[in-house]
Amino acid sequence: MPGEFAWIITLLDPETGNVQSTNYSEKRYGSQDEASVAGKAAVVEFLGRDGKIGAVPGRDGKPRP
């Protein structure tokens, strides 16, 4: 259906393989390509430009290296 594309991102904990977080867009996009570009931008925003999750602590509550 036109205009009904969205993105969903599931991040896994590399230590356990468990789901760390799932994020999805509330906005709907007109094409799959638009949703894909927006989803990629959301990943960069969430992880940061260096690709590391700085704000999410490890299991011991300390920041991950």
Image (cartoon, rainbow, N blue to C red):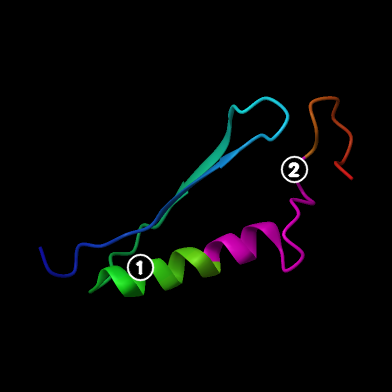
Tell me, for residue 21, which label it has, or none.
Answer: none
Main secondary structure along the magenta-highlighted residues: loop
* Residue drawn at point x = 54 percent, y = 70 percent: 41
Q: Is residue 48 left or right of residue 21?
A: right
Residue 47 drawn above or below residue 64 = below
Tell me, for residue 56, which label it has, or none.
Answer: 2
Query: How many C-alpha atoms fall within 10 Å of the one at disc 1: few (<14), some, or many (≥20)?
Result: many
* Residue drawn at point x = 38 percent, y = 57 percent: 7
Q: Is residue 46 left or right of residue 60?
A: left
Q: Dot 1 corresponds to which residue?
A: 35
The part of the chain drawn in magenta is 42-56
Image location of residue 55, percent across then percent down = 77, 49
Q: Is residue 46 left or right of residue 3?
A: right
* Residue drawn at point x = 79 percent, y = 51 percent: 54
Q: Amino acid at mark 1?
A: Ala
| Inter-mark Cα distance, 2 to 1 | 25 Å
* Residue drawn at point x = 77 percent, y = 65 percent: 50
Give SS at disc 1: helix
